[in-house]
Image (cartoon, rainbow, N blue to C red):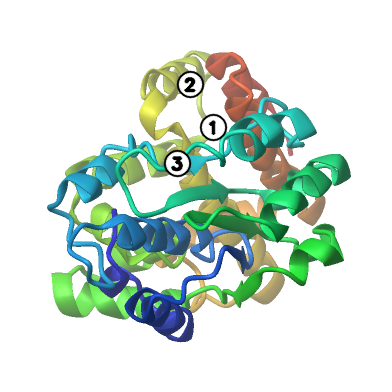
Amino acid sequence: MAGFHDIIGHDDIIRHLKNAIETGKVSHSYIFTGEPGSGKKLLAGTFAAALQCESGESEPCMTCDSCKKVIGKNHPDIITVTHEKPGSISIDEVREQVVHDVDIKPYCSPYKIYIIPDAEMMTVQAQNALLKTIEEPPEYAVILLLTSNIDSLLPTIRSRCVRLDLKIVDDSLVKEYLMEHLQVPDYQAEIDASYAQGSIGRAKEAATSQEFADMTANALKILKYVNTMEVYELTEAIKTLASDKNNINDYLDIFQFWFRDVLMFKATREIDNLVFKQEINFIREQASERSYENIEKILEALEKTKVRLRANVNLELALELLFLTIREK
């Protein structure tokens, strides 16, 4: 878990949130809106932790009981709304997890906080059900809606929430931080910063973790030779990835950066903006071998794989389908 001081960028929003805590003028509902990866979850999670923190400060202390519960992801008064279907949040889910739950007083904290990620997925009926709670919330309730498409929320909801617009934090800021504070070498800082998607906590984790370094090396080995591997080697590679279930999303992120690099180099012939500059020979080769259509297809297949994994499909099967697409020319 990060404190506000660990978050790079978003200075105005952080000032606003800390000020709300310090003055006791916390609104009952907020919308965090911004591109995927702009840090909505991180900011909302830090705000929730700070609101519940026993220190009474505007930064979570990380040591009190409440903060420990947040770190252990088992805080009874911070509820993250979940949904069954990959693409939608139903009225029943909103009723059960928010509307009917909100009347029960907090167990051990000053607030009861509801975080709704992907709020744009709420059906119109679900939004209408939530609206009543937003209009007449109990004193202790705080609702945090996170969305990358604010226009899909009803105007009546938008008008009753404090709106916080997040900009993606520039990778160069994160890279600079890693090089200055953690003495990470240039090319590694580039990879870590891309992976972190604006979250300094995630960047620090990547930069200091041997596991992440090994993972990057393993992913690159596959990416560089994917088209010349024998079938048995590819099967082995898929098995290895599938056995590392906990890190599979990180692997898919690294794959995405690679193919974006290939696309970027194909389009511009410039090296400056590439994540994997040090692998330029392989990137140049793949850019000349692959068509734009093929690279776009691979990037789409990577997104699809992430969706499939969230829906708990068979991991090896999902990876086999992905590699079929990657090996097509």
The amino acid type, in three-letter code, at marker 3 is: Lys
Residue at 64% across / 74% down in the picture? 163
Residue at 60% across / 63% down in the picture? 29
Q: Kindly check if marks 1 and 3 are in contact, taking CB atoms under 8 A apart as contact.
A: no
Nearer to the camera, 103 or 90 = 103
Residue that badge 2 annotates = 238
In space, the residues marked 1 and 3 are separated at their CA atoms by 61 Å
Q: Which one is earlier in the sequence, the residue at label 2 or at label 3?
A: 3
Residue 113 is situated, as x and y percent measured from the top left of the image, at 47, 50
Q: Element at badge 1?
A: loop
The amino acid type, in three-letter code, at marker 2 is: Ile
- Image position of 164 with respect to 32: above or below: below
Mark 2 neighbour density, 10 Å: few (under 14) some (14–19) many (20 or more): some
Q: Kindly check if marks 2 and 1 are in contact, taking CB atoms under 8 A apart as contact.
A: no
Q: Is residue 16 visible?
A: yes
The amino acid type, in three-letter code, at marker 1 is: Thr
Q: Which one is earlier in the sequence, the residue at label 2 or at label 1?
A: 1
Which label sits on residue 105?
A: 3
Left or right? Give the position of 205 relative to 228: left
Residue 56 is situated, as x and y percent measured from the top left of the image, at 22, 67
